[in-house]
Every structure is written in structure tokens, then in C-alpha cells.
Image (cartoon, rainbow, N blue to C red):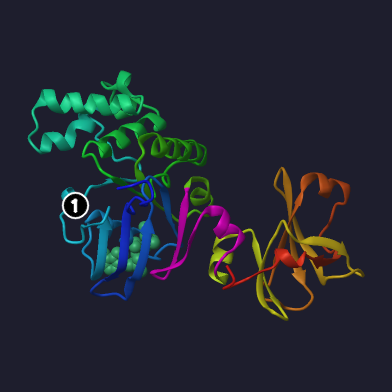
Amino acid sequence: MDDQTPPPAAIELIALTKRYAQGSVAVDSIDLKIAANSYCCLLGPSGCGKSTTLRMIAGHENTTSGDILLENRNITSLPAAARGTAMMFQSFALFPHLSALDNVAFSLKMKGVDKVTRHRQAQDLLERVAMGHLAQRKPGELSGGQQQRVALARALITQPRVLLLDEPLSALDPFLRIQMRAELRHWQKELGLTFIHVTHSQEEAMALADTMVVMNHGRIEQVGSPHAVYNRPASEFVARFMGGHNVLDTTSGKVAVRNDHIRLAPAEGAGWPATVSDVEYQGSYVLLGLRLDQAAASDKVSVMLAEADFVQAPYHPGDRVGLTWAPEQAHSFGAA
Ligand code: ADP
Ligand code: MG
């Protein structure tokens, strides 16, 4: 391979479809390429088909039709253990009665690998995630972050090319969740593997992903960097799901305008007349809820003001204002 040849996608999905016997289509003919060594987040509301997609990649769920390639190798009908993928589960699912070392070595033990060999490999992996010195501790004697590293080492013992994570942080309290996601991001870069991480949290996906895949009703609505998806949502669904946008029905069609891109003017000035309905202090900014005089696509509009601006010119429920925005801040759909 010369320098000009792009590396093969870590994972390629081709018209991948899952139809459960008793239900409608859970995953509806999706096409997707996930770049090698990237952090990819599958994002969407509950029931949109994220876990089903991940489980088909893992080999824990049969496909109805379509193909799954890993580095150009068709793995669609291979058993889970032969695919080159590994799964990291919610809450880490460590065995409480086993040491970190034995947790990591567990799958090798199941394969009949002798104790010296499996312990050496497990110890090496624990060193790689900076946990070598705690190899003899049981999960209960480790912090959440340390447990996550043990779970990571355990998933890596099969030498996967692609690590699959299904809502790995959703059972953690908010503080730990933010700490743990920074760790996941760090280890993905450090280990040079491809991570595919399922989440229903826009915030989590934006914080982690090189590439976000926004799903809805078994289909892909948009693929792109967090910046691209947030600034150029491809559909009304994406704009609403990502949050931070107002969808407004203008004479030239529906547009999305970020709530920090809307300016407020006195009611008798230019713009769309509206009434302030609520004021929420959020620390570094203040979020205003407003009702438009004329009904637009959004029944309610939100505007984010920097705290310093709000302090200069505060608003109160009942205040009359006019909404304006620069034309280039109004994003129409399908023009991404
Ligand atoms: P997500 O992970 O995005 O919340 P899932 O992939 O779990 O969504 O589910 C997608 C759709 O498939 C949902 O409508 C769900 O009810 C359905 N589904 C998931 N698993 C099964 C199953 N084992 N049998 C029947 N339907 C299922
Ligand atoms: Mg799920």
C-alpha cells in the first residue's frame, strides 16, 4: 500500500437491515463507513436502532440482510469471537469476586490458555492502561475510573481492531460520567483503536466523537463531525434532537437558528415580535423562553444570552421583544 491509498474503513455497513420477527424494521438498510482509529458515536433517541446496529456488528444479533465489513473483510456471518471486535458493557460488568488480573484473564481461561501465559498477557494489558500496580485488587477496591480501565483491558485481551461500547456511561452519576468519558477518549487515542460508542446523549456524543452518526427510526439522518452536525443539521429532526436550535417557519421555508445566534431588540424595533415567558439562570449564560406573536414551527423559542450581557440589560417574564438574526445564521435543511 503506498502513501496515497487511504486505509480501509475499520467498519463498513452496506444496506444493513434488521427486522425482528414480531416487529417492524429496527435497522432499515443503513450504509456507513467508519474510519480506522476514529471515535464514532451512534446517537439517537431510545428505540432508533443503535443497540441493534452495534449488536449486529458484534455478532450478537443476526442480520436480516446487508453486509458488515471489518477492514474490507466480510464478517457478516462470522461468530462473535472470530470477528476482531470486542464489546464493553454498561457498568463494566466485572466479576466482583475476581482480582483485576483474573477479570482481564477470564476469557483466556475459558479458552484453556495456561495460567502463566494468561496472567502474563493480562498483566501486560493492565500495564498498558496504567493499572499494573493494582492487578491484585478486586473491583470493589477500585474507583470507578480504575474499574473502567480494567473493563477496557478485559475487552482488549482478544486483540480486537474495533471496540464496541453500548451506553457504557449511562449508569454512572453525572460527575463520574464526565470524568469517564474523558478517559475513554484518551484511551481510544492512546491505543490507536476504533471505538464505536452508542449513546442517547447529544452532549456525550459531541464531547467524544470524531464522527457522529445521528439515527432515527432505524435510519441514518446525518453523519459528520460534531461541529458539522451542530452547525449544519441536515434535517428538522437533527436540529431538534441536537438541541440548542430553534426551528422557525420563515417565508423561505423552515430554518434552524442556534439559540445563541438570536438577537433581541425592543418590541417596537425590527424582527419577530415575541413575549418573554421564562428566564433561567444557567451560570455563564441565561436562557430565555419566548412565545412568538405569530405561530411559527416552534411553539416556543429559546434564546441564550451571555451572563454579562444579561446583567447589562436584564429581561423579565412579560417583557416584549423583537427577535432578529443574521441571514447567514439561518440554516435551511437539505442545504448542508
Ligand atoms: P436503541 O438502542 O436505539 O434504543 P434498539 O436497537 O434496542 O434501539 O431497538 C430498535 C427497535 O427494535 C425498537 O423498536 C425495539 O423495540 C426493537 N427491538 C429491539 N430488540 C428487539 C428484540 N429482541 N425483539 C423485538 N424487537 C426488538
Ligand atoms: Mg440501546
Q: Which residue is located at x 33 percent, y 47 percent?
A: 2
Q: Quadrant of residue 119 in the image?
A: top left
Which amino acid, mark 1? Ala
Q: Which residue is located at x 75 percent, y 68 percent?
A: 327
| Residue range corresponding to the magenta coloring | 209-234
Location of residue 164 in the rendering, given as x and y in whole percent from the top left corner: 32, 49
Q: Is residue 270 left or right of residue 97?
A: right
Q: Nearer the viewer, residue 184 or 69?
A: 69
**Total number of numbered discs in the rendering:** 1
Q: Which residue is mark 1?
A: 80
Q: Nearer the viewer, residue 96 or 220?
A: 220
Location of residue 252 in the rendering, given as x and y in whole percent from the top left corner: 70, 80
Q: Is residue 121 above or below residue 217?
A: above
- Tell me the element at label 1: helix
Q: Is residue 235 left or right of residue 310?
A: left
Q: Quadrant of the C terminus?
A: bottom right
Q: Residues within 10 Å of mark 1 (few under 14, many from 20)?
A: some
Instruction: Confirm whether residue 203 shows in the render.
Output: yes
Ligand 1 picture quarter? bottom left
